[in-house]
Amino acid sequence: MSDAASTDKKQKNNVKVSIKTNKFLYVDIVKYLLNEGETHVDISGLAASINPVVEIAEILKAQGLVEVTKIETTRAAEGRGRPVDRLMIRVVKAKGFQKVFDEQQAARAARDATKEKDSA
């Protein structure tokens, strides 16, 4: 595999969390990536984004969609030489992933259809 292809693959299944974006968007991204065939997804965040990383993994676990296979913490110097903490949580599909995912997608489609009907 070429370096470019390896880099693309590496970045595709790495979800970098920011505190500026709604955590439920990240939940949906992880679900989508796993449904599209990724064997695992790494959810990572720096400094203030560490808590949302944990929350995202816990939301997915509570829904019965994923299992956590790896938790990694690191501390590195960033920018002005100050140490910055980083958390990475690796998740894989839980046994009932497809069933739960399909049920959630059906519920979302029904909700969207109701919204369209009500607004018409």
Image: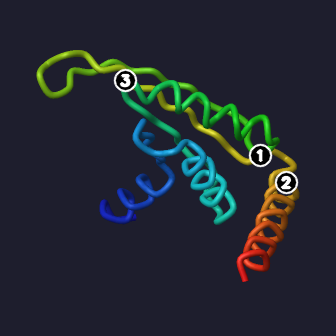
Q: Residues within 10 Å of mark 2 (few under 14, many from 20)?
A: some
* Residue 55 in the image, given as x and y percentages of width and height: 61, 30
Element at badge 3? Answer: helix
55 left or right, relative to 8: right
Nearest the camera: 119 or 72? 119
80 left or right, relative to 23: left
- Residue with the mark numbered 3: 47
Identify which amino acid the numbered label 1 is placed on.
Leu
Identify which amino acid the numbered label 3 is placed on.
Ala
- Residue with the mark numbered 1: 65
Q: Are marks 2 and 1 in contact (CB under 8 Å)?
A: yes
* Residue 29 in the image, given as x and y percentages of width and height: 57, 55
* Residue 97 in the image, given as x and y percentages of width and height: 81, 52
The quadrant the N terminus occupies is bottom left
Residue at x 11% of width, y 22% of height = 80
Identify which amino acid the numbered label 2 is placed on.
Val
Question: In the image, which is nearer the foreground, mark 1 or mark 3?
Answer: 3
Decide: is 12 above or below 48. Answer: below
Q: Quadrant of residue 106?
A: bottom right
Residue at x 56% of width, y 32% of height = 89
Q: Residues within 10 Å of mark 3 (few under 14, many from 20)?
A: some
Decide: is 65 above or below 38. Answer: above
- Residue with the mark numbered 2: 100
